[in-house]
Image: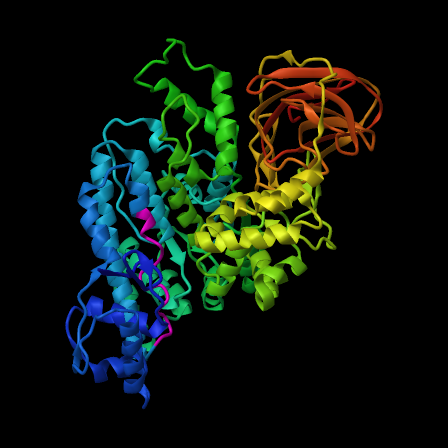
Amino acid sequence: MPTLHLLGRVYMTQDDHALSLSHKAAALLAYLALEGRPHHREHLAELLWNHSGALRNLRVELTRLRQQQLALFPERQPMLSLHCDTDLSRLTAAAPLLGERQLPGWLAQLRGLPLGDLDDLGSPAFQEWVTRQRLRLCEVLENLLSEVQLRFAQRGQMQAVEQIRERAAQLDLHLPPVSSGPAPAVRDRPFAFPAQEAELRRVLNRSDRSPHVVYLSGPSGAKRALIDAAARGTDWKVLHLQVTAQPRLFQATLVQQLAQALPELSGPLLASLARLESHQSLDLIQLAQVLMQSDTPLLLSMNIHQAEAWFTGGLHFALNGRCPMTLVLISGSADVLEDVRQQLGPVNLERMLRLTLPPVGAAGLLPVLTEQAQGESTPAPTGAAVHPDDLYGRAARLSVRTEGWPLYLRSLLGSVPGEDPAPSAAQTSEMASARLAELQYLSAPVRRGLSVLAQVHDRFDLPLVRELLGPLAEEVLHVGAQRGVLVPAQLEEEVELPGLLTWVSDAEPHLAFASEITRAALAGRLTPAERHDLRRRLAVLAWPESPALAAHYAERAGLHDLAAQASAALGTPEVAPPRLPAAQPAAMPLGTAAPRREVRTPGGYRVALEHGRLEVLRRGRPGPTPRLRLKFGHVSAGPWSVTLRLDLYTHLLPGEASGPYALGLGLGQEPQKVYAPAPLSAPVAPGLDPCLGLLPLGRWVQISGQGGAGPLILSTRATDLALTIGALSWNGQRFLPER
């Protein structure tokens, strides 16, 4: 039975296998399925092609459909109609019996805006039909999601409600608020960003008669809650909008929301929809003039995926008006917001604010996990309360696994208390869909090119990308870097403390994915056969330069002879026994109220200062790992001590020329003392002292010794890492907590 998919890109599947359809064939099937009645061939041809050869083109498309064994239309019949299963009908049928376990997979079917790739096809009449149908389908989805969230809320399953609302927000669908009976606070508690919320409140206090603009970037899943929290208890009316690539859809949605929020202006606002229907475009400047008649404070939160000239033109006019308005422009990419700022031209700096939400770290997770532990209905088998150290370790590991992404964290926090939650297949699929939705504005060839590069478990340069992508290489690298998906990546990275400054050489030719979650999501877009073929090619390409990487690819591709040859080239490393004094148990150092500041290096390390502690976190690709150097100020000779804990440490690619370790400590260019949870291979990498100290996992410990004078440097090199430094002193000079 064929199924027509309408929620996002339009395509058809037969027995769960996607069929190859042209855009016009997809448009024809969507039109007939949604119309639900027969139409003359002449009408369909004129609607979709609107030229003298239209009927011939329609016959060609019908022939192609029959060649794919799709017997949808009888031959030589003047009237065509289509009745088939759709993803919308499946979604609706599954809704009444939906449980919390099935919810992520159900929501994953909402791939994007309905009829997502049918714009600019066919005649003006067909384009108007697409706009009307999309608005109708959005309304159907809003009603369906509202019913589902109400059922979950009535059962007290507020984590499920939050998942529904997050997915709806990504698609610019608007759901009514819901409340529930008693439920664990962890399921619906937003993560707190008090410093950023206070900044936004200050902007609202200044925006009484002069519009202000706020550029808000950071991970998805928290920005909307921050805006609502800042406006709570004030007179500000908050509207959340998605700036889509289809101006008409955005404009119609904007007018409808404004008419509901400002009933005194509903007449002129709704009248403007007539202009939208007749001219296919709404002058945002005229709309801004209507808004200037209102005294109601209006906060417009607009999610932007790319800078659009038609949007920034109306935005510029609104900012130069006189009305109580705050425009919060949201994007996961600071580069996109910078493009919008440049298109806006000169804006009074006093009326502009840049805000960035950092990823959630261990300190941000601890209150949520503590509530979860205190709310457990079943005591631990030993009858003992959960130790704070265990909660801290769980928080650190969760922050690494999710890259501090609030949406991912909330999905995992509903797992069994007292355990490290591992994402289910449905949760992984849902998070991949959410991350890919942020890339929906990239062209199909660029998305496919990035999916190919996502199979590379290393940095890559232009020659390698040309080997894999051919003539598309330059475009994929340019667009990927422009959108922040790819970043220049060095083998040696540095972060300067306490300013958290990092940089990359302009001459660096290699790039890597900025996020491992994004890389994994893109990698999953290829078929198993395509991934297998790429591993075989990569194994051969890697062999001359990196036997370790060649062995890695060859084992995954089933090239046993090459894998054995590469492994033999690596030899059998010796193990360096521990020689440094054992770490001593320590209490968790007292923190401060300092808000979180975080920087992410191109190699995937997250370095953060929060509550007077230094966090170094990484979720890395399974390949060669860059070394990170943390540079502090100059110190004088004397005793030193470090209080720290290591909660996660893995390394997935043995046999590299430069081995992994959890912590290195030294001055300037002198060999660093090395610490890890297990003995290391010998000889250790250049610049490291062969003496090794062992660090236990999951406990606060102190290491100490005598040192000389010079610039203090800490370093690390690990695939996955959760390292927290609670106190650091050298000859009486204290670097933590923050002063």
The residue sitting at the front extreme is 561
Q: Residue at x 64, y 57 (%)?
A: 464
Magenta stretch in the rendered image? 107-121
How many labels, in total?
Answer: 0
Left or right, residue 415 beside residue 205: left
Which secondary structure type mostly characterizes the magenta part of the structure? loop
Camera-side residue of 12 and 160: 12
Task: Return the x and y of residue 80 as percentages of the image width and height.
Answer: 18, 76
Q: Which residue is drawn at 59% across and 42% down?
A: 552
Left or right, residue 298 beside residue 199: left
Q: Which of the 4 image quadrants contains residue 8?
A: bottom left
Q: In this view, does 604 lie above or below 249?
A: above
Task: Return the x and y of residue 35 as percentages of the image width and height.
Answer: 19, 69
Left or right, residue 510 beside residue 523: right
Camera-side residue of 706 and 219: 706
Residue 269, can we see it? Answer: yes
